[in-house]
Image: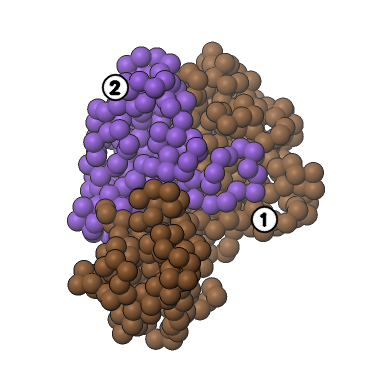
Amino acid sequence: MGSLRQMFRARFAGRVAAAAAVTGLLLTEPVLSAAPSAAAVADIPVVGTTSIAVSSSATARVQVLVHGVRRVPGGTVLYYSLGAPAGSQVALSQLSQPNQQARFPLRGQRTGTNFLIDGASSTVYESLVDAQDNTLSSPLSAWPQQGGTFYVLYQAFPELPAGVGFVDVQVGHGDVATHVPVQSGPLQPAVSGDRPIALGAGWPAVDTAAIGSSVQPAKSIHPLQTVSSDKDKTVTTRQEPKKVTVDLASDVLFAVDSATLSSRAQAQVAKAVATINARAAAGQVQVVGHTDSTASDSYNLDLSRRRAAAVLAAVKPKVTVSGVTFSAQGRGESDPVESNSSSEGRAANRRVSIVFTPKSAS
Amino acid sequence: MRGLRAVVLLVLVLVLVAAAVWFAVLRGGDDTTTPDGRAPAGDGGNAAEITKRYLPTAANADQPVAGADGTISSDVAKVPARADVLALVADDASTTVRWRLSTAAAGTSVDPGLLSNTRGAPDTSAVSLYSPEQDLELYPGHWTATDTSITLGAPCTCSKQPFETGPAGVELSGVYQALPDDVASIQVKIPGFPAITVPVTRR
């Protein structure tokens, strides 16, 4: 029933409002005094929401509305607005400080510190920049000046791949509007974005020529690494767009100074192989042994090689995906993930990594 | 003929009134929140309607689905604190948790790094999701930013840690990888608090 209602609202809300206006029917509460008086946009989309608590004044909250993530020539534009309760000028100014503590940090004289997250491809998109390293985004002069209404801002990003239908929008220092649809074309009508734009007065004009000529857009695209593990952290998986790495704790796989797999090792190896089989893709499996720094370099290098070979022998017959190639190597103590100064750090460094690179990504 | 026109006009007006009333009722109906507990997105309106619907007020503060009492480090001492999970939503691409950190006293400072997995970084990367059935613990994602002037360490798909909180609390969030389909509830693990078990809402 809820979805039917939403469908009704989405499809007919505009028509009903227009008809009601003609017949003089009042559908809503009286227009708020702080709202723009001469609205140029009658039907404003809201495709995502989040809120930002102002750190230094926890009682003040600024609402973020996402109006669109839109494909334009050469890039992607995020349209969003910020709104604080009436009388919240202080909150708005505190929200945007050019420092680490601000919940919505500024980048120079621009506002472009939002990110687009595509979880499906493990990719994060940062603002496009021009030759002077200015983000292609609303200038500081467009920042909201008073509470009681929303003000519209924009930020330009690199082009999203054609298959990306939804993204999460991370606003400022980490507050997230989730599952925002990616749509085509800039929002209209466009108005100058050099001054604050009250919601309804139009959308900030986007310089598509600047977007098309932005400096090294690839620099604004980052692989996202996500980490998961079991409770005891004996199997830790790091997912990236082009590879997945499964770290198996050597303390579970082997006895001290041994390269013979323990009885408990099979379950850990099975978890790692399940990750590879789940990808269902041909590719390359590299098994890499690591040690802590307790013994000599040469001893550790040899031990890591023997352990990598033992794990490879256990992994290989369990991989059911065809077209997978295998290799093993040892790196001794040369590639720690933690400091060797603590017992916890040394335990983390004693590991065998299984790195799977699907063929399409290699 | 005039009578017929009047009837047609009356019917037209009644239809519009009915549609308007239905629409107005729906706006205040029982589906006024999204799966993540927020006001609904995707239903636009004019500026006045949207301002009325979304502008933050005490009345539209989100209600928690679960919570726990714990402590946070503040100016060396530990002080009682409250963590409330507002929503946990999963889809095929990611899992998002929103939660609120509050204390009884206004202006309570929060020690830097308290909620972080990255040394010295004032983020909330140590907040994890744990499924006992799957023996699976998830952490927020990380990446390397071009501009390091606004970040410390690796940027995280999680909120920066607040430096202060108080009775109203500070809302925080994190984006994690997608959960397996058969995970119906999950523990939100926040340093200083007992694990908070919350239902997983599927989008």
Task: Give x and y (percent) for residue A315.
Answer: 33, 79
Identified at 29% across, 62% down, the residue is A251
Rendered purple, the chain in question is B
Rendered brown, the chain in question is A
Q: Classify residue A89 by image quadrant.
A: top right
Task: Give x and y (percent) for residue B173.
Answer: 41, 39
Identified at 27% across, 28% down, the residue is B70
Task: Give x and y (percent) for residue A309.
Answer: 38, 80
| Residue A259 horizontal side relative to residue A183, left or right | left
Identified at 31% across, 47% down, the residue is B129
Q: Chain of mark 1?
A: A
Q: Which label number is shown at residue B80?
A: 2
Identified at 54% across, 13% down, the residue is A87
Residue highlighted by disc 1: A219
Task: Give x and y (percent) for residue A308.
Answer: 39, 75
Please, what secondary structure does the residue beneath circle 2 have? strand
Q: Classify residue B105 by image quadrant.
A: top left
Viewer-proximal residue among B12 and B112: B112
Please, what secondary structure does the residue beneath circle 1 have? helix
User: What residue type is disc 2 on?
Assistant: Pro
User: What residue type is disc 1 on?
Assistant: Lys
